[in-house]
Image (cartoon, rainbow, N blue to C red):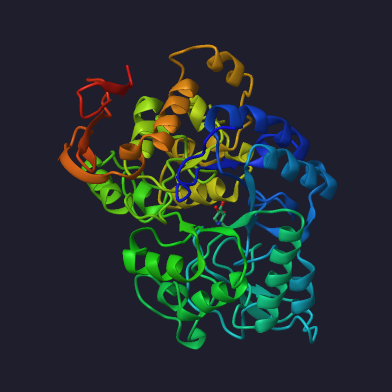
Amino acid sequence: MYNKGMSKHKLIYQIYPSAVGDLNDIAALIPRIAEKLHPDYIWLNPFFESTWKDGGYDVTDYCKIEPRFGRLKDFRHLVSVAKKYNIGILIDLVINHTSSEHPWFKLSEQHDPKYKDYYIWLDRPLNWKSFFGGPAFDYSAARDEYYLHLYDSSQPDLNFNNPAVVREFRAIIDFWTREGAAGFRVDSANVLAEDNLKKGFIPGLPGFFHYYQKPQTIKVLERLFAGKKLYTIAEPVGGEFFSKRKFYELTNRAFSASFNVGTLDVADSFFSTKDKVYPVNYRRWFRKLAKWAPEPKFSMALESHDAPRSPSRFSTDPRVLAMLQFLLPSYNPCIYQGQELGTPNANLSNNIQDYPGVQSRQVYRRLRRQGKTKEQAMAIVKRISRDNARQPINWGEYITQGGQDDSVLNFYSRLIELWRNDPVVADGTLRVRKISKSGVFDFERSLGKKTYRVHLDFSCKTPSVLINDSGETLISSK
Ligand code: NOJ
Protein backbone atom coordinates (compact mmCIF):
# COMPACT_ATOMS: atom_id res chain seq x y z
CA MET A 1 0.00 0.00 0.00
CA TYR A 2 1.31 3.44 -0.95
CA ASN A 3 2.37 5.50 2.04
CA LYS A 4 0.13 8.54 2.11
CA GLY A 5 2.56 10.22 4.43
CA MET A 6 1.96 12.67 7.21
CA SER A 7 -1.62 12.75 8.30
CA LYS A 8 -2.16 16.48 8.19
CA HIS A 9 -1.47 16.48 4.45
CA LYS A 10 -4.62 15.70 2.52
CA LEU A 11 -4.83 15.57 -1.24
CA ILE A 12 -8.26 16.13 -2.73
CA TYR A 13 -9.23 15.19 -6.26
CA GLN A 14 -12.32 16.88 -7.67
CA ILE A 15 -14.67 15.15 -10.10
CA TYR A 16 -17.45 16.92 -11.96
CA PRO A 17 -19.77 13.97 -12.60
CA SER A 18 -21.62 15.30 -15.63
CA ALA A 19 -18.34 15.50 -17.51
CA VAL A 20 -17.45 11.90 -16.64
CA GLY A 21 -20.53 9.71 -16.88
CA ASP A 22 -22.38 7.85 -14.15
CA LEU A 23 -21.25 6.78 -10.68
CA ASN A 24 -20.02 3.44 -12.04
CA ASP A 25 -17.86 5.22 -14.62
CA ILE A 26 -16.38 7.25 -11.78
CA ALA A 27 -15.76 4.10 -9.73
CA ALA A 28 -13.98 2.58 -12.73
CA LEU A 29 -11.62 5.58 -12.89
CA ILE A 30 -10.53 5.32 -9.29
CA PRO A 31 -7.77 2.70 -9.75
CA ARG A 32 -6.07 4.87 -12.40
CA ILE A 33 -6.32 8.05 -10.39
CA ALA A 34 -5.17 6.28 -7.23
CA GLU A 35 -2.17 4.70 -8.94
CA LYS A 36 -0.86 8.03 -10.21
CA LEU A 37 -1.97 10.60 -7.65
CA HIS A 38 -2.94 8.77 -4.44
CA PRO A 39 -5.55 11.26 -3.27
CA ASP A 40 -6.97 11.06 0.25
CA TYR A 41 -10.38 12.28 -0.86
CA ILE A 42 -12.45 12.52 -3.99
CA TRP A 43 -14.89 15.41 -3.94
CA LEU A 44 -17.85 14.87 -6.24
CA ASN A 45 -19.75 17.88 -7.52
CA PRO A 46 -23.53 17.52 -7.10
CA PHE A 47 -25.11 14.40 -8.53
CA PHE A 48 -28.49 14.82 -6.85
CA GLU A 49 -31.87 15.30 -8.43
CA SER A 50 -31.75 18.82 -9.90
CA THR A 51 -33.10 21.10 -12.60
CA TRP A 52 -29.52 21.42 -13.97
CA LYS A 53 -29.79 25.14 -14.61
CA ASP A 54 -26.61 25.67 -12.60
CA GLY A 55 -24.76 22.41 -13.11
CA GLY A 56 -26.51 20.61 -10.26
CA TYR A 57 -26.23 23.49 -7.76
CA ASP A 58 -30.01 23.76 -7.97
CA VAL A 59 -31.11 20.69 -6.06
CA THR A 60 -34.68 19.38 -6.03
CA ASP A 61 -34.00 16.42 -3.69
CA TYR A 62 -30.83 16.12 -1.61
CA CYS A 63 -31.21 12.43 -0.88
CA LYS A 64 -32.05 11.26 -4.39
CA ILE A 65 -29.49 10.61 -7.06
CA GLU A 66 -30.21 12.02 -10.51
CA PRO A 67 -31.20 8.86 -12.47
CA ARG A 68 -28.59 9.38 -15.21
CA PHE A 69 -25.86 8.99 -12.54
CA GLY A 70 -27.25 5.77 -11.13
CA ARG A 71 -28.76 4.69 -7.84
CA LEU A 72 -27.84 4.46 -4.20
CA LYS A 73 -26.36 1.03 -4.69
CA ASP A 74 -23.98 2.56 -7.26
CA PHE A 75 -22.95 5.19 -4.75
CA ARG A 76 -22.24 2.45 -2.20
CA HIS A 77 -20.18 0.60 -4.80
CA LEU A 78 -18.21 3.79 -5.50
CA VAL A 79 -17.54 4.22 -1.78
CA SER A 80 -16.34 0.64 -1.47
CA VAL A 81 -14.00 0.90 -4.48
CA ALA A 82 -12.58 4.17 -3.11
CA LYS A 83 -12.09 2.58 0.29
CA LYS A 84 -9.85 -0.10 -1.22
CA TYR A 85 -7.48 2.70 -2.18
CA ASN A 86 -7.82 4.50 1.12
CA ILE A 87 -9.84 7.28 -0.47
CA GLY A 88 -12.84 8.93 1.17
CA ILE A 89 -15.72 10.36 -0.84
CA LEU A 90 -16.74 13.98 -0.19
CA ILE A 91 -20.28 15.06 -1.00
CA ASP A 92 -21.09 18.57 -2.22
CA LEU A 93 -23.52 20.13 0.25
CA VAL A 94 -25.44 22.81 -1.64
CA ILE A 95 -26.78 24.45 1.41
CA ASN A 96 -27.33 28.14 0.79
CA HIS A 97 -30.20 27.60 -1.64
CA THR A 98 -32.34 24.99 -3.30
CA SER A 99 -33.85 24.94 -6.76
CA SER A 100 -37.08 26.92 -7.09
CA GLU A 101 -38.54 23.55 -8.16
CA HIS A 102 -37.71 21.96 -4.80
CA PRO A 103 -40.94 20.90 -3.05
CA TRP A 104 -39.91 22.99 0.00
CA PHE A 105 -40.00 26.14 -2.13
CA LYS A 106 -43.26 25.23 -3.82
CA LEU A 107 -44.86 24.68 -0.41
CA SER A 108 -43.28 27.84 0.97
CA GLU A 109 -44.80 29.81 -1.90
CA GLN A 110 -48.17 28.41 -0.89
CA HIS A 111 -47.75 29.50 2.75
CA ASP A 112 -47.75 25.90 3.91
CA PRO A 113 -47.47 26.16 7.73
CA LYS A 114 -44.43 23.87 7.91
CA TYR A 115 -42.50 25.46 5.03
CA LYS A 116 -43.59 29.09 4.95
CA ASP A 117 -40.40 30.25 6.72
CA TYR A 118 -37.96 27.95 4.95
CA TYR A 119 -36.89 30.79 2.62
CA ILE A 120 -36.32 34.55 2.94
CA TRP A 121 -39.54 36.37 2.09
CA LEU A 122 -40.12 40.15 2.16
CA ASP A 123 -43.07 42.23 1.16
CA ARG A 124 -40.82 44.65 -0.71
CA PRO A 125 -37.56 43.92 -2.53
CA LEU A 126 -34.24 45.33 -1.30
CA ASN A 127 -31.63 46.65 -3.67
CA TRP A 128 -29.24 43.72 -3.13
CA LYS A 129 -27.37 42.36 -6.11
CA SER A 130 -27.00 38.67 -6.91
CA PHE A 131 -23.57 37.09 -7.49
CA PHE A 132 -24.52 36.27 -11.07
CA GLY A 133 -25.52 39.92 -11.68
CA GLY A 134 -28.97 41.53 -11.53
CA PRO A 135 -31.26 41.93 -8.53
CA ALA A 136 -31.13 39.44 -5.64
CA PHE A 137 -34.87 39.66 -4.94
CA ASP A 138 -37.57 38.31 -7.20
CA TYR A 139 -41.32 38.38 -7.05
CA SER A 140 -43.36 35.23 -6.49
CA ALA A 141 -46.88 35.70 -7.82
CA ALA A 142 -47.99 32.56 -5.97
CA ARG A 143 -47.10 34.11 -2.62
CA ASP A 144 -47.33 37.79 -3.58
CA GLU A 145 -43.98 38.44 -1.89
CA TYR A 146 -40.31 38.76 -2.81
CA TYR A 147 -37.73 36.06 -2.15
CA LEU A 148 -33.98 36.35 -1.82
CA HIS A 149 -31.64 34.59 -4.25
CA LEU A 150 -27.94 35.35 -3.94
CA TYR A 151 -27.40 33.37 -7.14
CA ASP A 152 -29.83 32.82 -10.03
CA SER A 153 -33.55 33.55 -9.60
CA SER A 154 -34.07 29.77 -9.88
CA GLN A 155 -31.98 29.31 -6.68
CA PRO A 156 -33.93 30.75 -3.72
CA ASP A 157 -31.93 31.22 -0.51
CA LEU A 158 -32.86 29.08 2.45
CA ASN A 159 -33.62 30.75 5.77
CA PHE A 160 -30.95 29.56 8.19
CA ASN A 161 -32.44 31.60 11.00
CA ASN A 162 -35.10 28.91 11.00
CA PRO A 163 -34.00 25.93 13.18
CA ALA A 164 -36.17 23.57 11.10
CA VAL A 165 -33.93 24.25 8.07
CA VAL A 166 -30.85 23.44 10.13
CA ARG A 167 -32.49 20.18 11.23
CA GLU A 168 -33.22 19.28 7.59
CA PHE A 169 -29.54 19.60 6.74
CA ARG A 170 -28.41 17.64 9.78
CA ALA A 171 -30.63 14.84 8.52
CA ILE A 172 -29.16 15.16 5.00
CA ILE A 173 -25.62 15.01 6.43
CA ASP A 174 -26.56 11.94 8.47
CA PHE A 175 -28.09 10.30 5.41
CA TRP A 176 -24.94 10.59 3.28
CA THR A 177 -22.69 9.69 6.18
CA ARG A 178 -24.66 6.50 6.71
CA GLU A 179 -24.25 5.75 2.99
CA GLY A 180 -20.49 5.98 3.44
CA ALA A 181 -19.47 9.59 2.70
CA ALA A 182 -16.26 10.58 4.47
CA GLY A 183 -17.09 14.26 4.52
CA PHE A 184 -18.49 17.27 2.73
CA ARG A 185 -17.51 20.22 0.60
CA VAL A 186 -19.86 22.99 1.69
CA ASP A 187 -21.01 25.27 -1.09
CA SER A 188 -21.15 29.04 -0.45
CA ALA A 189 -20.40 28.19 3.15
CA ASN A 190 -20.15 31.66 4.63
CA VAL A 191 -23.29 33.36 3.34
CA LEU A 192 -25.96 31.16 4.86
CA ALA A 193 -27.66 33.54 7.29
CA GLU A 194 -28.65 37.19 6.83
CA ASP A 195 -29.23 39.89 9.40
CA ASN A 196 -31.16 43.13 9.44
CA LEU A 197 -33.15 42.29 6.35
CA LYS A 198 -35.25 45.39 6.61
CA LYS A 199 -32.27 47.75 6.37
CA GLY A 200 -30.71 46.34 3.27
CA PHE A 201 -29.37 49.34 1.45
CA ILE A 202 -25.64 49.90 1.32
CA PRO A 203 -24.30 51.92 -1.59
CA GLY A 204 -21.55 50.25 -3.59
CA LEU A 205 -22.00 46.68 -2.47
CA PRO A 206 -25.70 46.45 -1.76
CA GLY A 207 -26.55 43.80 0.75
CA PHE A 208 -23.12 42.21 1.04
CA PHE A 209 -22.51 43.06 4.67
CA HIS A 210 -25.92 41.82 5.68
CA TYR A 211 -25.09 38.27 4.74
CA TYR A 212 -21.32 38.04 4.58
CA GLN A 213 -20.10 35.53 7.19
CA LYS A 214 -22.44 36.57 9.96
CA PRO A 215 -22.04 35.07 13.49
CA GLN A 216 -25.29 33.20 12.92
CA THR A 217 -23.79 31.42 9.90
CA ILE A 218 -20.88 30.18 11.98
CA LYS A 219 -23.27 28.92 14.67
CA VAL A 220 -25.30 27.06 12.05
CA LEU A 221 -22.18 25.41 10.64
CA GLU A 222 -21.03 24.40 14.11
CA ARG A 223 -24.40 22.87 14.78
CA LEU A 224 -24.37 20.99 11.50
CA PHE A 225 -21.04 19.32 12.03
CA ALA A 226 -20.85 19.16 15.84
CA GLY A 227 -19.69 15.79 17.15
CA LYS A 228 -19.15 14.29 13.69
CA LYS A 229 -15.87 12.78 12.54
CA LEU A 230 -15.85 14.06 9.00
CA TYR A 231 -13.49 15.88 6.66
CA THR A 232 -15.22 19.16 5.90
CA ILE A 233 -14.02 21.74 3.44
CA ALA A 234 -15.58 25.16 2.97
CA GLU A 235 -16.10 27.04 -0.23
CA PRO A 236 -16.36 30.55 1.15
CA VAL A 237 -17.62 33.44 -0.91
CA GLY A 238 -15.89 36.77 -0.81
CA GLY A 239 -12.66 36.93 -2.81
CA GLU A 240 -10.76 39.92 -1.51
CA PHE A 241 -13.00 40.20 1.54
CA PHE A 242 -12.15 36.74 2.76
CA SER A 243 -9.48 37.84 5.21
CA LYS A 244 -7.33 35.65 7.43
CA ARG A 245 -9.60 36.63 10.33
CA LYS A 246 -12.63 35.28 8.43
CA PHE A 247 -10.67 32.18 7.46
CA TYR A 248 -9.77 31.39 11.09
CA GLU A 249 -13.29 32.05 12.28
CA LEU A 250 -14.64 29.59 9.72
CA THR A 251 -12.01 26.88 9.99
CA ASN A 252 -11.40 27.00 13.76
CA ARG A 253 -15.03 26.47 14.49
CA ALA A 254 -16.48 24.35 11.71
CA PHE A 255 -14.11 23.06 9.03
CA SER A 256 -11.11 20.83 8.44
CA ALA A 257 -10.03 23.08 5.56
CA SER A 258 -11.13 25.93 3.36
CA PHE A 259 -10.62 27.11 -0.18
CA ASN A 260 -10.14 30.80 -0.94
CA VAL A 261 -10.89 31.64 -4.55
CA GLY A 262 -9.45 35.11 -3.87
CA THR A 263 -5.94 33.62 -3.87
CA LEU A 264 -6.47 32.67 -7.53
CA ASP A 265 -8.67 35.49 -8.78
CA VAL A 266 -6.25 38.08 -7.50
CA ALA A 267 -3.97 37.00 -10.37
CA ASP A 268 -6.10 38.26 -13.23
CA SER A 269 -9.44 39.62 -12.14
CA PHE A 270 -10.93 41.47 -9.22
CA PHE A 271 -13.43 40.13 -6.77
CA SER A 272 -14.63 37.32 -9.03
CA THR A 273 -16.58 39.69 -11.29
CA LYS A 274 -15.53 37.48 -14.19
CA ASP A 275 -16.56 39.80 -16.97
CA LYS A 276 -13.24 41.56 -17.28
CA VAL A 277 -9.93 39.93 -17.96
CA TYR A 278 -6.79 41.66 -16.74
CA PRO A 279 -3.23 40.72 -17.61
CA VAL A 280 -1.79 38.37 -14.98
CA ASN A 281 -0.37 40.33 -12.07
CA TYR A 282 2.27 37.89 -10.83
CA ARG A 283 3.41 40.12 -7.98
CA ARG A 284 -0.02 40.40 -6.41
CA TRP A 285 -0.71 36.73 -6.99
CA PHE A 286 2.51 35.23 -5.62
CA ARG A 287 2.54 37.55 -2.62
CA LYS A 288 -0.97 36.53 -1.75
CA LEU A 289 -0.19 32.83 -2.15
CA ALA A 290 2.93 33.15 -0.01
CA LYS A 291 0.72 34.51 2.78
CA TRP A 292 -1.89 31.79 2.53
CA ALA A 293 0.03 28.67 1.55
CA PRO A 294 1.58 27.97 5.00
CA GLU A 295 -1.84 27.83 6.67
CA PRO A 296 -2.44 24.17 7.63
CA LYS A 297 -6.16 24.48 6.85
CA PHE A 298 -5.83 26.30 3.54
CA SER A 299 -6.62 24.36 0.39
CA MET A 300 -4.79 25.56 -2.70
CA ALA A 301 -6.64 24.99 -5.95
CA LEU A 302 -5.61 26.27 -9.36
CA GLU A 303 -8.66 24.94 -11.16
CA SER A 304 -12.22 23.91 -10.48
CA HIS A 305 -15.55 23.56 -12.23
CA ASP A 306 -15.91 27.36 -11.72
CA ALA A 307 -12.77 28.49 -13.48
CA PRO A 308 -11.14 28.20 -16.88
CA ARG A 309 -8.27 25.72 -17.27
CA SER A 310 -5.07 27.01 -15.67
CA PRO A 311 -2.54 26.42 -18.51
CA SER A 312 -4.78 28.51 -20.80
CA ARG A 313 -5.62 31.06 -18.14
CA PHE A 314 -1.97 31.72 -17.29
CA SER A 315 -0.51 30.82 -20.73
CA THR A 316 2.12 28.60 -19.18
CA ASP A 317 3.42 25.06 -18.87
CA PRO A 318 1.15 22.93 -16.64
CA ARG A 319 4.29 21.61 -14.93
CA VAL A 320 5.15 25.07 -13.61
CA LEU A 321 1.63 25.39 -12.23
CA ALA A 322 1.93 21.99 -10.60
CA MET A 323 5.18 23.09 -8.94
CA LEU A 324 3.47 26.17 -7.58
CA GLN A 325 0.74 24.03 -6.06
CA PHE A 326 2.97 21.36 -4.50
CA LEU A 327 6.25 23.13 -3.72
CA LEU A 328 4.83 26.02 -1.78
CA PRO A 329 3.69 24.70 1.60
CA SER A 330 0.49 22.84 0.70
CA TYR A 331 -1.60 20.98 3.23
CA ASN A 332 -4.91 20.38 1.45
CA PRO A 333 -4.20 20.82 -2.26
CA CYS A 334 -7.07 20.08 -4.62
CA ILE A 335 -6.58 18.82 -8.18
CA TYR A 336 -9.44 19.28 -10.60
CA GLN A 337 -10.11 16.38 -12.99
CA GLY A 338 -7.90 16.64 -16.05
CA GLN A 339 -5.55 19.20 -14.50
CA GLU A 340 -3.04 16.38 -14.04
CA LEU A 341 -3.19 15.78 -17.80
CA GLY A 342 -2.46 19.44 -18.61
CA THR A 343 -5.90 19.88 -20.18
CA PRO A 344 -6.29 23.31 -21.85
CA ASN A 345 -9.49 25.34 -22.27
CA ALA A 346 -12.12 23.77 -24.51
CA ASN A 347 -12.71 25.13 -27.96
CA LEU A 348 -16.07 26.61 -27.04
CA SER A 349 -18.76 27.71 -29.46
CA ASN A 350 -19.16 31.28 -30.74
CA ASN A 351 -22.87 31.05 -30.09
CA ILE A 352 -24.07 31.82 -26.56
CA GLN A 353 -27.10 29.56 -27.04
CA ASP A 354 -24.73 26.57 -26.96
CA TYR A 355 -23.57 27.33 -23.39
CA PRO A 356 -25.26 25.24 -20.72
CA GLY A 357 -24.14 27.27 -17.69
CA VAL A 358 -26.15 30.20 -16.27
CA GLN A 359 -22.95 32.10 -15.51
CA SER A 360 -21.74 32.29 -19.14
CA ARG A 361 -25.14 33.52 -20.28
CA GLN A 362 -25.35 36.14 -17.53
CA VAL A 363 -21.85 37.44 -18.32
CA TYR A 364 -22.73 37.62 -22.01
CA ARG A 365 -25.90 39.61 -21.34
CA ARG A 366 -24.02 41.98 -19.03
CA LEU A 367 -21.28 42.57 -21.60
CA ARG A 368 -23.81 43.27 -24.32
CA ARG A 369 -25.59 45.75 -22.03
CA GLN A 370 -22.24 47.45 -21.46
CA GLY A 371 -22.10 48.06 -25.23
CA LYS A 372 -19.76 45.28 -26.34
CA THR A 373 -20.38 43.81 -29.81
CA LYS A 374 -21.44 40.18 -30.09
CA GLU A 375 -17.90 39.22 -31.15
CA GLN A 376 -16.23 41.15 -28.31
CA ALA A 377 -18.61 39.69 -25.74
CA MET A 378 -18.11 36.14 -27.02
CA ALA A 379 -14.32 36.52 -27.02
CA ILE A 380 -14.47 37.29 -23.28
CA VAL A 381 -17.04 34.60 -22.52
CA LYS A 382 -14.93 31.97 -24.29
CA ARG A 383 -11.93 32.89 -22.22
CA ILE A 384 -13.48 33.08 -18.79
CA SER A 385 -16.38 30.62 -19.07
CA ARG A 386 -16.75 27.92 -16.44
CA ASP A 387 -17.90 25.68 -19.29
CA ASN A 388 -14.25 25.43 -20.35
CA ALA A 389 -13.62 23.07 -17.47
CA ARG A 390 -16.88 21.15 -17.66
CA GLN A 391 -16.15 19.20 -20.84
CA PRO A 392 -15.60 15.44 -21.04
CA ILE A 393 -12.01 14.38 -20.43
CA ASN A 394 -10.16 11.95 -22.63
CA TRP A 395 -9.36 9.42 -19.90
CA GLY A 396 -7.41 7.35 -22.40
CA GLU A 397 -4.72 9.97 -21.81
CA TYR A 398 -3.98 8.19 -18.53
CA ILE A 399 -2.67 5.30 -20.56
CA THR A 400 -0.91 7.40 -23.21
CA GLN A 401 0.69 9.82 -20.76
CA GLY A 402 1.33 7.03 -18.28
CA GLY A 403 3.71 5.51 -20.84
CA GLN A 404 5.63 8.75 -21.49
CA ASP A 405 8.26 9.55 -18.93
CA ASP A 406 8.11 13.31 -19.56
CA SER A 407 4.30 13.61 -19.59
CA VAL A 408 2.40 16.06 -17.39
CA LEU A 409 0.73 13.11 -15.65
CA ASN A 410 4.02 11.50 -14.66
CA PHE A 411 5.33 14.88 -13.60
CA TYR A 412 2.36 15.24 -11.21
CA SER A 413 2.99 11.75 -9.96
CA ARG A 414 6.65 12.47 -9.13
CA LEU A 415 5.81 15.81 -7.58
CA ILE A 416 3.15 14.30 -5.33
CA GLU A 417 5.57 11.60 -4.26
CA LEU A 418 8.04 14.31 -3.20
CA TRP A 419 5.28 16.26 -1.48
CA ARG A 420 4.28 13.18 0.48
CA ASN A 421 7.67 11.80 1.35
CA ASP A 422 10.26 14.55 1.50
CA PRO A 423 9.93 16.25 4.89
CA VAL A 424 11.33 19.57 3.60
CA VAL A 425 8.79 19.74 0.77
CA ALA A 426 6.02 18.56 3.05
CA ASP A 427 6.70 20.69 6.07
CA GLY A 428 9.51 23.16 5.47
CA THR A 429 8.97 26.81 6.31
CA LEU A 430 8.72 29.28 3.46
CA ARG A 431 11.04 32.15 2.69
CA VAL A 432 10.36 34.22 -0.41
CA ARG A 433 13.53 35.25 -2.26
CA LYS A 434 12.30 36.95 -5.41
CA ILE A 435 9.04 37.78 -7.11
CA SER A 436 9.18 39.47 -10.49
CA LYS A 437 6.66 41.15 -12.73
CA SER A 438 7.50 38.71 -15.52
CA GLY A 439 6.43 35.67 -13.50
CA VAL A 440 9.58 34.52 -11.71
CA PHE A 441 8.95 33.23 -8.19
CA ASP A 442 12.02 32.12 -6.20
CA PHE A 443 11.62 30.80 -2.70
CA GLU A 444 13.21 28.53 -0.12
CA ARG A 445 11.81 25.77 2.01
CA SER A 446 13.71 24.93 5.20
CA LEU A 447 13.44 22.24 7.80
CA GLY A 448 16.08 21.70 10.49
CA LYS A 449 19.45 22.18 8.83
CA LYS A 450 18.16 21.60 5.32
CA THR A 451 17.19 24.34 2.88
CA TYR A 452 15.81 23.66 -0.59
CA ARG A 453 15.59 26.26 -3.33
CA VAL A 454 12.69 26.58 -5.74
CA HIS A 455 12.82 28.59 -8.93
CA LEU A 456 9.57 28.97 -10.87
CA ASP A 457 9.41 30.80 -14.18
CA PHE A 458 5.94 31.30 -15.60
CA SER A 459 7.36 32.73 -18.84
CA CYS A 460 9.16 29.37 -19.30
CA LYS A 461 12.35 31.16 -20.43
CA THR A 462 14.29 29.22 -17.80
CA PRO A 463 13.47 25.76 -16.43
CA SER A 464 11.53 25.73 -13.18
CA VAL A 465 13.44 23.64 -10.64
CA LEU A 466 13.57 22.31 -7.10
CA ILE A 467 17.13 22.00 -5.78
CA ASN A 468 17.94 20.28 -2.50
CA ASP A 469 20.54 21.18 0.14
CA SER A 470 23.27 19.19 -1.67
CA GLY A 471 22.67 21.08 -4.91
CA GLU A 472 20.86 18.18 -6.61
CA THR A 473 17.89 18.96 -8.85
CA LEU A 474 14.99 16.94 -7.49
CA ILE A 475 12.54 17.95 -10.17
CA SER A 476 12.64 20.19 -13.22
CA SER A 477 10.00 21.39 -15.65
CA LYS A 478 12.32 20.77 -18.62
C1 NOJ B 1 -20.41 27.77 -5.94
C2 NOJ B 1 -20.34 26.64 -6.93
O1 NOJ B 1 -19.03 26.18 -6.99
C3 NOJ B 1 -20.86 27.18 -8.24
O2 NOJ B 1 -20.63 26.29 -9.29
C4 NOJ B 1 -22.32 27.51 -8.09
O3 NOJ B 1 -22.78 28.16 -9.24
C5 NOJ B 1 -22.55 28.44 -6.90
N1 NOJ B 1 -21.79 28.08 -5.73
C6 NOJ B 1 -24.00 28.45 -6.52
O4 NOJ B 1 -24.32 27.24 -5.90
Along the viewing direction, whichever of 324 and 418 lies nearer the viewer = 418
Left or right of residue 169, residue 292 in this image: left
**In what quadrant does ligand 1 lie?**
bottom right
Q: Residue at x 56, y 62 (%)?
A: 151
- The location of residue 152, given as percent across then percent down, is 59, 60
- The location of residue 198, given as percent across then percent down, is 50, 87
Along the viewing direction, whichever of 266 and 274 lies nearer the viewer = 266
Locate the C terminus by quadrant: top left
Q: Is residue 60 visible?
A: no
In the rendered image, the vertical position of residue 384 relative to residue 317, given as above or below = below
- The location of residue 54, given as percent across then percent down, is 63, 52
Along the viewing direction, whichever of 434 and 394 lies nearer the viewer = 434
Along the viewing direction, whichever of 54 and 458 lies nearer the viewer = 458
Q: Residue at x 45, y 77 (%)?
A: 214
Q: Is residue 294 visible?
A: yes
Left or right of residue 227, residue 333 in this image: left
In the rendered image, the vertical position of residue 288 relative to residue 83, given as above or below = below
Locate the N terminus by quadrant: top right
Left or right of residue 92, residue 434 in this image: left
**Which residue lies most toward the top here?**
404
Report the number of discs. 0
- The location of residue 470, given as percent across then percent down, is 20, 25
Q: Residue at x 52, y 78 (%)?
A: 219
Image-quadrant location for residue 396? top right
